[in-house]
Amino acid sequence: MIESLLHLDENLYILINSGLSNPLFDTVLIPFRHKLFWVPLYLAIICFILLNYGRLAWLTLIALILTVVISDTVSSKLIKKSVKRTRPCNQEHIQSVERVHCGHGYSFTSSHATNHYAVGSFLFLLLSMTRWRWSFMCWAGVIGFAQIYVGVHFPFDVIIGSVLGCIIGWIVFMIYTNVYSKLTNKYLQT
C-alpha cells in the first residue's frame, strides 16, 4: 500500500514538474514561491487589520504571527526531522526539472504549503464576511503547486502540508476568537 502511494506520488510529481513545463509557468511560478514577492500583500493585510480591528488589532496581528510560527515549527522542526524524506530533486532515480536551487533539506511536509495554508485559512475565517476571502486559499494553492513545479516537493508533501496548515489556521483562529470575544466584552464593560 505505501509503495503504491509513493509510486503514485512520484508519477504525479513527474507529470507536474516535467509534463506541465512551459514558459508561462516558469515566469510566474518561480517568483510566486519567494517570500519577498508577497511583501506588498503582507503589508496590505497588516494595514487592513490596523484600520479595521481598532483597539484589538494587536491581538489579530499576534494571532497571525503565531499561526506562522506554529505551522513552520510543526512542519520544519517536528515532521521533516522525523520523517526525513529526501526531496525529489535529490533523488537520482526520478527524472525532474530543477528550476530553483534544490537544497539538502527534507521534503515532507512542504513548509511553504503548511505555512501559506495556515495563514490562508486563518484569513479565510477572519474575513468570512468578504467575498474575496477565497483568494487566500487560491494564493496558498498556487504557492503549493509551485513547490512541485520547481522541483523541490512531491505532491503528497504539499497535500499533507496543506491539510496540516488548514488545521493549524483553524485551531489558532478558534483560540483567537475566544480571546477576542473576552477582550471585547472587557473593553465594553470599561
Image (cartoon, rainbow, N blue to C red):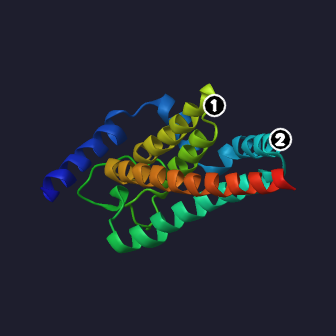
Which quarter of the rendered picture does the N terminus lie within? bottom left
Identify which residue is drawn at 19% across, 52% down: 5
> Is residue 7 left or right of 70 when viewed as pictured?
left
Rendered location of residue 87, percent (x, y) = 36, 60
Nearer-N-terminus badge (1/2): 2
Residue 70 versus residue 61 in the image, above or below: below
Q: SS class of the residue under badge 2?
A: helix
Quarter-wise, where is residue 175 in the image? bottom right
Q: Nearer the viewer, residue 131 or 160?
A: 131
Mark 1 vs mark 2, foreground winner is 1
The numbered mark at residue 56 is none
Q: Residue at x 50, y 29 (%)?
A: 24
What is the three-letter code of the residue carrying label 1? Met
Q: Amino acid at mark 2?
A: Leu
Whether residue 33 is visible, yes or no, is no
The Cα atoms of the two marked residues, 1 and 2, are separated by 16 Å
Judge whether 100 appears above or below 131 on screen.
below
